[in-house]
Image (cartoon, grey):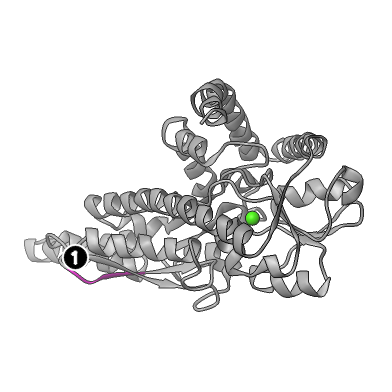
Amino acid sequence: MDRRKFVKAAGAAGTASLLAACGSKTAATACTESSSGPVTDGLKWKMVTTWPRDFPGLGTGANHVAELIGKLSNGRLTVEVYGGNELVPPFEVFDAVQRGTAEMGHGASYYWKGKIPAALFLAGVPFGLTGNEMNGWFYYGGGLDLYREAYAPFGVIPFPTGNSGTQMGGWFNKEINSTADLDGLKMRIPGIGAEVIKRLGATPVNIPGAELFTALQSGTIDATEWVGPMNDLAFGLFRAAKYYYYPGWHEPGSVLESIVNAEAWAALPADLQEIVATACKATSLDMYAEFEARNGIALRTLVDEHGVKLRAFPDEVLAEFKRVSFEVLEEVAAADEMAGKIWASLKAYLATVRQWTEIGSQYFLNHR
Ligand code: CA
């Protein structure tokens, strides 16, 4: 081969391999820009979310990540946020990120339980870790690696991005004095909690958040859980049911997540990757702090201004919720290898930190 032909062939091969490495449109843009020196502007990502646009705490948390990425990167990577149904329906967020329709998504892992059984464990489990303990598990207990391993077969990379804190047990039109009061009760409750109350005689139903108030007021359901005082006050649920039960045994510290298309991620220069990861981490703190602060204020409003009757579930009812929760968790873990691995890790972590939580936080709080 003469020199001219060789150069031409090498050039063509180079172009081909660049295209192969930069398969998606976004990846190609990133590759072109990063290979020609520092990227100054132009990378645009879409973020699809499972929340209504600007929904307090959760939707605004997604906005927070997007804004942070834009600011920290000085506009080199900007993220446009789409509320549920604006680009794709809420429950298609995972698919949209997997196929690259959007580079990023925000939601909660348990929505993807149909694809990833292990996802049921990754937002927290009934009677499991608190929000603080989940953070310990993710960042210093091996949790993040398992989280990534569970999502890797789908070409999607997850990042913990927010926490609701311990939720409330829900709104009821009658008092729950024993498990017999659960018999025939129609309650909106998702995830493992739904299976638990079903085994105790209730009828769990799943209704989108926006329809909860009407369903409860019209008597279509007898009870509902949602999130906590901040979100529940905003929905006006206190106008449809009298008793507000605690604790949120079924969601002791629900973790929200960002998911990123693996190809789009690989195409980012290292500093932008660090910016995305750091923005997710910073938003976890921000959302948790917002829930803690605003739940406190909203609870006072519910009790002082709206006369809401607070009730604790009786100890024997909680003991039954707990017994059945672990029965269900063990069954889910036994049916799927990755779920089993994650459940084993969560249990080992809890066994290690339990005493510290008890003497470090719980005992102190009992005496504050
Ligand atoms: Ca909830």
Does 239 appear above or below 198?
Answer: below
Q: Position of residue 123 (x, y in %)?
A: 57, 47
Question: 308 left or right of 363?
Answer: right
Dot 1: what SS?
A: helix
Question: 245 left or right of 56?
Answer: right
Taking depth in this image into account, of 247 and 311 the one nearest to the observer is: 311
What is the span of residues highlighted in magenta in the rendered image? 41-45
Residue at image x 58%, y 46%? 166
Q: Tell me the amino acid under the disc marked 1.
A: Glu
Considering every residue shown, the one lying at the far left of the view is 3
Q: Does the image show residue 243? A: yes
Taking depth in this image into account, of 156 and 236 the one nearest to the observer is: 236
Taking depth in this image into account, of 10 and 20 the one nearest to the observer is: 20
Label the magenta part by its dominant secondary structure.
Answer: strand
Disc 1 crowd, CA 10 A, few/some/many (<14, 14-19, 20+): some
Q: Does the image show residue 12? A: no
Does 197 appear above or below 76?
Answer: above
For the N terminus, give its image quadrant.
bottom left
Residue at image x 49%, y 54%? 291
Q: Position of residue 122 (x, y in %)?
A: 57, 44
Ligand 1 is found in the corner quadrant, namely: bottom right
**Residue labelled with disc 1:** 33
Give the quarter of the image for residue 91.
bottom right
Q: Position of residue 167 (x, y in %)?
A: 61, 50
Instruction: Reply yes or no: does residue 123 show up in magenta.
Output: no
